[in-house]
Amino acid sequence: MDLGIANKVALVTGGSHGIGRAISEDLGRAGCRVVVAARGQQKIDDTVAAIKNAGGQAIGVSADLTVFSDYPKMIEQAKAAFGLPDIAIYSPVAPPPGGFNEYTDDDFDLAYAYVVKGFAHFARAVVPGMKEKRWGRIVTIGSGCAKWPVRMTTANFSYVLANTHRPAALGLSRSLADELGPFGITVNTIPPGFIETGESYDAFFQQCADNAGLSFEAFMADLLKRIPLKRFGRPEEVSALAAFLCSQNAGYITGQYMVVDGGNMETYY
């Protein structure tokens, strides 16, 4: 399918691993000039090489989403290489699992900064260029917690920081969709279900299993039985939707929360 976005400039945060890498590669195959923003230089280089080897155009930008001064730097480097971003993918630093008594006020403030304020800084960085062009696509990789809080009684783990701050991020996304619509800019959120993304995925659920007093194998088996498709998802199954939302034909889709979870989300939380 021709997405109609050849030569568009796409900035992908967290673009060197997991879902972010899959999105970077899909947008590269669609003809976008991709700016891969992440922290680990080796993974950045590997992703840029993969895009180029497939015939695409890409550069890597070393950036830390927890450092707000890095956001305008990403834009400057994108502009120098390809131009201002037309497409922007935001994947925030996810808060750790855990219950209310495990976290201090500082922990709540930090999670809010990463999940909500980080997105605000990202939007401030990418939106002016999109307004000038009167065209843009912003996609955030969100969480099911924004609508269905994770509950210890049903999920075997607590996720109080995400349960608290993910709804705020979704509220910001939908508010931006309203404000930016007149400029031809769409804003949508994709909350993935349980997606196989490698080491970080395993480490997160190992912590959840430890908190629940279960072995990793038992914890993961319990998650699996709750998913109607009886498997965990693949990054490519999320990136395919992200790429479509960035396409020309998705121009009438905005302010949406589109779940990719194997049918699990509404029954699980």
Image (cartoon, helix red, strand yellow):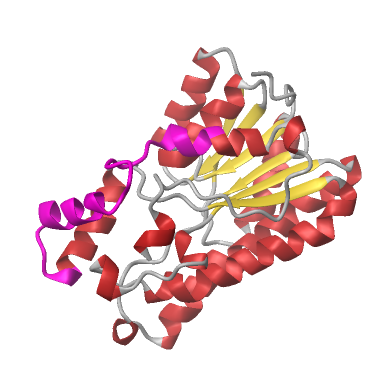
Quadrant the C terminus occupies: bottom left
Q: In the figure, is residue 243 to the left or right of 180? A: left
Q: Nearer the viewer, residue 112 or 150?
A: 150
Q: Note whether 112 is above or below 175 in the view shown.
A: below
Q: Note whether 52 is above or below 65 in the view shown.
A: above
Quadrant the N terminus occupies: top right
Q: Position of residue 100 (x, y in %)?
A: 34, 84
Residue at image position (78%, 52%) is: 127
Residue at image position (47%, 45%) is: 260
Residues shaded magenta? 211-240
Q: Position of residue 236 (x, y in %)?
A: 45, 32
Say if the magenta span includes residue 238.
yes
Q: In the figure, is residue 210 to the left or right of 74? A: left
Q: Nearer the viewer, residue 165 or 223?
A: 223
Q: Nearer the viewer, residue 127 or 233?
A: 233
Q: Position of residue 238 (x, y in %)?
A: 49, 39
Q: Quadrant of residue 203?
A: bottom left
Q: Is residue 114 visible?
A: no
Q: In the figure, is residue 91 to the left or right of 125? A: left
Residue at image position (53%, 65%) is: 115
Say if the magenta span includes residue 188.
no
Q: Is residue 116 visible?
A: yes
Q: Quadrant of residue 262?
A: top left
Q: Note whether 26 is above or below 175 in the view shown.
A: above
Q: Note whether 59 is above or below 148 in the view shown.
A: above
- Marks counted in the figure total 0
Q: Position of residue 150 (x, y in %)?
A: 37, 69
Residue at image position (31%, 42%) is: 232
Q: Main secondary structure of the magenta part?
A: helix
